[in-house]
Each structure stands twice: as structure tokens, then as C-alpha cells.
Image (cartoon, rainbow, N blue to C red):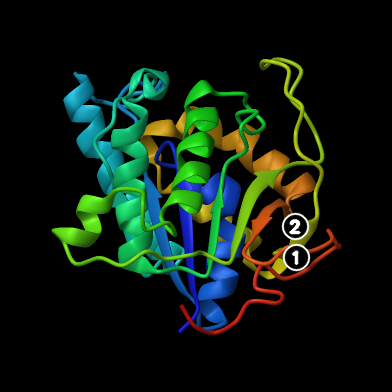
Amino acid sequence: MLRLLCITAHPDDEAGGFGGSLLLYQERGVQTHVICLTPGQAATHRGEARSGDELAAIRRTEFQASCAILRVSHGEVLDYADGALDQQDLLTVVGELARRIREIRPQVVMTLGPEGAVTGHPDHSMASIFATLAFHWAGRANRFVEQIEKEGLQPHRTQKLYYSTTAFTMPDRPPISPPPATTIIPIGPYLDAKISAFKAHTSQSPLFPFFENTIRQRGAEERFHLVATMKPATAANETDLFAGVLDHD
């Protein structure tokens, strides 16, 4: 079975950056997984939450509702601190993601770009760095050896790594230099579902008008930058994240 793993920083990233592709590939028979590093407890918009712990619990529930709309095979929210991914121990986070990669054994991993995606958020940047190292190190027998010797996991080489990217920037956010798109996925038939999945994050409702307006104007496609492949290759334009992927581990 083909497997797609998406690694994000906050609940709602899965819908905003990847929702159309997650649903499209699920409908093509691909097993889809989302790992979110934080429960989003430091968000500006907090709904009725009276504390960070309450907001984290609310956003975990919202994340699962979003994943249900996108028909994600398995979604998981980890426990790293929102707004502080740059303060986490690198080997701890990368090791946890490498473990997930060795367990799930995806052929394709997609994540945010190191520029921080369109919002330039530092957590997005760190999620990119952690995911990139995990992509490479999960396939090496000399990295996180205890997972192999004590847990019985095996190294896994994911065939392709993608960063999400955009064709626009936001002047009211930190300046970013987005990676150029190599892969454009048409998601027109899934546009309404993507918006609905984002709106499942009801604690973030002040963002809904801007998000929906932006997506309806610009969102008939999701854009990605091919970062790495298992076999050396020359970059080429793609319309399929699984182009050239072999249907095995």
C-alpha cells in the first residue's frame, strides 16, 4: 500500500497547507497519516479556553474532527510546547519523528518549509527542520540505534520529501523566501472539504473569513517543492506527489 505522511506544527496546519492533497490521495487509495508536533496551546485565538491546558484539549478534538473530514487514516498530536519548538532538544524531537517514520514506513513525506510557510511562523520552520532530519536519519542504521536494537524497528528510507510552498506572500507577516514550486496538485474538487476541515478548528474562528477568501481566490491547487529523493535525479515539474514512487517499502 502507498503511504503518505504529513508532519506539521499546529492543529489547523493539516487543513490549511495540505488538506486538498490529503483528501485527494486518500480517495486514490493512499494511506494518509498526519503528525502534529504541538497541541497549539499558545494560539492567539483561544475560544472559550481558560488556560493553555484547556485550549490544548479543545484543539486536539478539533484536529481529530478536521482529520475525519479529510479522511486521514491516522492523525496524532504530540506534546511539544506551542511557540517553543526552537527550544526543544533536537535529537529528542527528530528521534520521535524517526520512530514514527520507521513505524509507518511512508513512501512520501510532506511538511512545511524552513522559511516558516506563508506566515513565517518559527514553529513552522522548526517542524521543517525536524522533519527533514527525520526523513534522512530514519533510513540509517547508525542513527537512533536503540530503536533498532531494543524496539525491533528497522531503518526506513522514504522515497520523496516535499515542502509546501505558495505563489504569494503576506505583507503583514514576517518576510519569507518560499521555495519554488516543482509540484502542483490540482485540488479544485476538494476545495470545499478543505475549507470545512479548517473550520472544524472552531477555536480559530476569527481566521475563517480571511482563510476562506484566500483559498477561494488562490486555492484551486496546492504547491510543493521536491526537496529530496531516494535516487539522485534532475528536477522536473510534477503533478503527482507519487510520481516515480515504487509501491514497496
Q: Is residue 2 left or right of 48 when viewed as pictured?
A: right
Q: Residue at x 18, y 60 (%)?
A: 149
Q: Residue at x 81, y 41 (%)?
A: 167
- Look at the image and tell me whether residue 98 can be seen: yes
Q: Are marks 2 and 1 in contact (CB under 8 Å)?
A: yes
Q: Residue at x 37, y 40 (%)?
A: 94
Secondary structure under tag 1 reads strand
Residue 47 in the image: above or below residue 13: above
Per the image, the residue denoted by label 1 is: 186
Secondary structure under tag 2 reads strand
- Look at the image and tell me whether residue 39 can be seen: no
Mark 2 / mark 1, whichever is N-terminal:
1
Number of numbered callouts drawn: 2
Per the image, the residue denoted by label 2 is: 221
The quarter holding residue 186 reads bottom right
Q: Is residue 118 left or right of 248 when viewed as pictured?
A: right
Q: Residue at x 30, y 54 (%)?
A: 99
Where is residue 139 shown, x and y percent of the image? 44, 59
Local packing at callout 1 (Cα closer than 10 Å; few below 14, some 14-19, many 20+) is some
In 3D space, how far apart are the residues under numbered discs 2 and 1 (Cα atoms)? 4 Å
Where is residue 163 shown, x and y percent of the image? 64, 47
